[in-house]
Image (cartoon, rainbow, N blue to C red):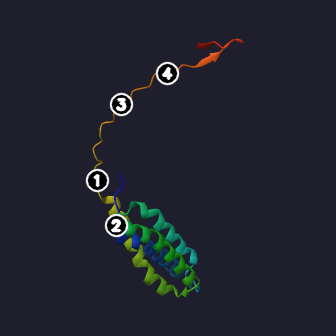
Amino acid sequence: MERPLSVSAWLGAPALLAAAVVGLTGAGGLVLHADWRVTLPSWLCGSGAALAIALAESVTWRSRTQRRLLCVGYPLGLLGLGTLTGGIALPLPVAMVLGLPGAVVLVGLVLHRLAEPTPPAPPRTPTRRRTRPSPLTVRAWRGTGSKAVNS
């Protein structure tokens, strides 16, 4: 049995993913003493939208309307954000400062989630045994007569 996900955790997962990618890219650039800037790729918001769609089934929604509006609107909003912010360049220290806290929070949430005990499965209801229907008799036509013979 899977553990339910809160709506706020579902809303934050794509943002934490994007922050972690930007932060780790910035940290890698600083470690390598690179002189390039971290460019926000549009595919980063696309992967966030895919993550939101993938996790939507495990969210405990408050109402059907909330589920319908957020399951469609939020990923579409992330895709729109990706087209608007694609190509924005950040200096390495800024990218690292913005993103590494997101990476730490994301790893902490995943570890916390893995450490939680799995709730017990609901008791199984006894299944009713189905009675098997009697086998159908197949009628084969033998010879040229119109007489049916059970086989």
Distance in Å between CA atoms under marks 3 and 2 = 36 Å
Secondary structure under the numbered disc 2 in the rendered image: loop
Please name the residue that numbered disc 3 is placed on.
Answer: 129
Amino acid type of the residue tagged 1 in the rendering: Pro
Q: Nearer the viewer, mark 4 or mark 2?
A: 4
Residue 63 numbered tag = 2
Q: Position of residue 75 (x, y in %)?
A: 49, 72
Earlier sequence position, callout 2 versus callout 1: 2
Identify which residue, 142 or 12, lies in the foreground: 142
Secondary structure under the numbered disc 3 in the rendered image: loop
Amino acid type of the residue tagged 2 in the rendering: Ser
Earlier sequence position, callout 4 versus callout 1: 1
Amino acid type of the residue tagged 4 in the rendering: Pro
The crowd level at tag 2 (other Cα within 10 Å; few <14, some 14-19, many 20+) is: few
Q: Could you tell me which residue is drawn at 35 percent across and 51 percent down?
A: 1
Earlier sequence position, callout 4 versus callout 3: 3
| Placement of 45 over or under 145, stated as above or below | below
Q: Position of residue 72 (x, y in %)?
A: 48, 70
Secondary structure under the numbered disc 1 in the rendered image: loop
- In which image quadrant can residue 150 be found? top right
Q: Position of residue 43 (x, y in %)?
A: 57, 74
| Circles 2, 1 touching at the beta carbon (< 8 Å) | no
Left or right: residue 73 versus residue 118 is right
Amino acid type of the residue tagged 3 in the rendering: Arg
Please name the residue that numbered disc 4 is placed on.
Answer: 135
* Residue lying furthest front: 146
Residue 119 numbered tag = 1
Distance in Å between CA atoms under marks 4 and 1 = 44 Å
Earlier sequence position, callout 1 versus callout 3: 1
